[in-house]
Amino acid sequence: MKKIFGFMAALSLAAAFSAAGHCGEEWPTFRGGSARAGVIPARTATYVASGDVVWETHFRQPIQSSPALSKGVVYFGSDDGGFYAVSASSGETLWTFRTENWISSSPAVYGETVLFGAYDGKLYALDKRGGKLKWRHTTHNGVASSPAVANGYAYFGGIDGNVYCVDISTGWLKWSYKAGREVYGSPSVSGGTVYIGNHDGKMMALDALTGKLKWRAIVGGPVTACPAVSNGMLYFGSWDGKLYTAEIKHQAVIRSFDSGGSIESSPLAANGRIYFGNIKGTLYAIDAKDGNVSWTVETGARIASSPALSAGVLYFGNDNGSVYAVDARNGAVIWKTDMSGAVVTAPAIGPDGIYVTAADRESGALRYIK
């Protein structure tokens, strides 16, 4: 079933939210949580999507914002400057909030608040039920970074070269750190530390309470993908084509793996392996202990999409507009389906399906695949 909607809500909010409770599990932010694991916990991962498209909603401009899912509502931004709340069960638009520029930042839902950045230089906080503005925090340039939320604070990077920590209840700045070059990437927050990269090839570890630099690693190219934290290790990719492993305790990079192509896909660490894609269209699974390749999948087009894992299956997209389901054990392609445009975003995992956004030259789409 295919539906095309404009910019006005097609359902009343009361009816929509009363029907929204079918989604019991949450994917409230980019990659599922503040540590950016990209994984549904094993106790809740009970299904494998079959590849069947339940509904598809089209919008007038491309979508480069990865969706978030909370209480039966999907949230994301668009190149048209609109931020959308869409019913997870029907694809109907519930409400829209207009910014002054395009949005590639992925939202974070925290309590009754949804936060996201825009290229108008602001981080926005909206009431998640009706889209009313709570506050906005202004930076000195665009905000492409997807905020991470932890302990009542939102952490994000700015194209102005700063990393910010903002109080979610008030929008007041707690601290900022001058990173140098542009910060397009999104942070991970774990163990009281904020991990984030910049365009100078620096991966920084900042104290979450004070913003003080704890340590940093400098690599051979910009770091725009979000790092992943797992079992005392930090994993991150770079435009130099390498996937780096840093030991957090010793504050040092201990290994790198050369994928042969720029890495813009955020790595996923699970089951003793690291999964990520590169600009040449290869999805890699490498062993977390020794960095050796376990398997690869060739897709034929750039993979900027960050993989998500549920019930042993990896879901991701590529620039050809294909969405893949791949067996995480051996790399076997379970199914592939095509969107209406390039998939540069990360899927959101729901309790009985996945939500994927796409961008072609003139329009965008949100698809629910079950």
Image: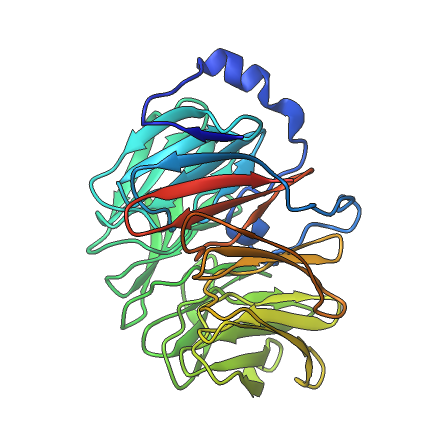
Q: Position of residue 355 (x, y in %)?
A: 55, 42
Number of numbered callouts drawn:
0
Which quarter of the picture shows residue 178?
bottom left
Q: Nearer the viewer, residue 88 or 370?
A: 370
Q: Quadrant of residue 57?
A: top left
Q: What residue is rendered at 49% in x and 60% in y?
A: 305
One can see residue 362 in this view: yes
Q: Position of residue 32 (x, y in %)?
A: 58, 49
Closer-to-camera residue (58/125)? 58
| Relative to 332, 323 lies left or right | left
Is the N terminus in the top left, top right, bottom left or bottom right quadrant?
Answer: top right
Pick the residue in front: 12 or 29. Answer: 12
- At a point 38% along the width and 27% down the height, the residue shown is 5
Q: Residue at x 80, y 46 (%)?
A: 43
Residue at (59% x, 75% y) in the render: 248
Horizontal side of 134 relative to 268 (left or right) equals left
Does 174 sit above or below residue 23?
below
Residue 290 picture location, percent across and down: 70, 86
Quarter placement of the C terminus? top right
